[in-house]
Amino acid sequence: MDLDTVFDAKSFFRFTGPPEHWLTAIKYMTWGLEEELRPRWAKIRPGDIFFIHSTRESFFSNARSGIIGLGVIGTDFSEKKNPLWFYETLKSVNRWPLLVPLSEIYLFSELPPSNSWDNPSPDNTEKTKNLINLLLANLIPLKQIPGFPPMGSFSSVKSNVANRILLDKRPLYLYFGFEESRMPQIESQLDIKTERVDRLSDKIKNAREALRYVDTLRIFDSVKARTVIKEPVSQYMRDNEILDRANAMHASILEQLIVLFQKHGYETRSSRTVDLFAHNKDKAFLFEIKSTENKNFRIQARKGIAQLLEYDFFEVEKFSQDNNLLFNERHKLIIPSQIPSDNRYIEFINSLNIGVALSEKDCLKPVGKDFGFSII
């Protein structure tokens, strides 16, 4: 898939800080913002892309200014109450409490595996200095990127400027967290609380917009061809889910559902995890789309069941409460890409009050029991 497919739907940011702080960000897959930036922090979404600007202003004399890589925003935003970054440890302050989760970081230079070195602190300055030399080895000076914002700790980046960096040909060394983040390693000592649970606040108009929440760049051909994975972990299930959401069949079904429900006056929403949530004042439909064949229907449906129950309990329930919505009907539906022949398993799904249906141009065609969802 080409990055242009979702390029216009993404937001692009520049995060700025000294190189020692970026080493901490790489180790724990998180970045921090000041309290005064809370309104802008609240607008950052999973799947957004950020560029890493390392500054000359630093505790270390070998620091240089330039762009050293890029990354993708993850989920589960949180706040901390204790020091984490070098400056905070040195001054015993909590200057950057608003944490931004990072699902992937792509560096222009290669570092040793993050579990082989300690978080930068006043106790390991010589080792940190050596790591900074590696981190900055292939930086891009700002003067080579016309239009890149040079001032402030956090700002938006125009899409034409972002495109210039994203389509560069140099290798990208990929570092990513174990599942969403490595922060669980230090959560207790930082006194962290999770924020920003509402994930259904944004409306979508088409299937392309739904992909904006995908928190990886590895599904895009132009990035994948340049990527060198430095810290392989078990990402098989997660990557399969992402690829499933990105494939042509999945996108076609999603587009058909969006068109169908918008035609009937429903609002259509999506998130990093939810394929589609459609609602009006009276009815709500939560969909999980699965690319299926008869041989893998049970496997795909099993995952769909768990996802629908979780998303309904957390995302839909919170969205309903926050918007004072009390639906007369709430439907959960698995939408396979072809008619399943496993009737016994469909009976099992129906026993959980979950429907199975095919998406057709003008309707939902029930497979098994119809709980009333075919009447849109």
Image (cartoon, grey):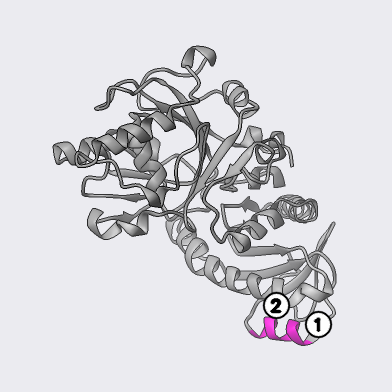
Secondary structure mostly seen in magenta is helix
- Horizontal and vertical percent for residue 363? 81, 62
Observer-nearest of 21 and 11: 21
Nearer to the camera, 20 or 85: 20
Q: Secondary structure at mark 2?
A: loop
Is residue 38 within the magenta segment?
Answer: no
Q: Is residue 247 visible?
A: yes
Amino acid carrying mark 1 in the image? Asp
Q: Position of residue 201 (x, y in %)?
A: 51, 49
Magenta segment, which residues? Answer: 344-351
**Quadrant location, the C terminus:** bottom right
Say left or right for 260 vs 238: right
Looking at the image, which residue is at 50% across and 53% down? 199
Mark 1 or mark 2: which is in front? Answer: 1
Q: CA distance from mark 1 to mark 2?
A: 19 Å
- Label number found at residue 371: 2
Residue 345 lies within the magenta run: yes
The local secondary structure at tag 1 comes to loop
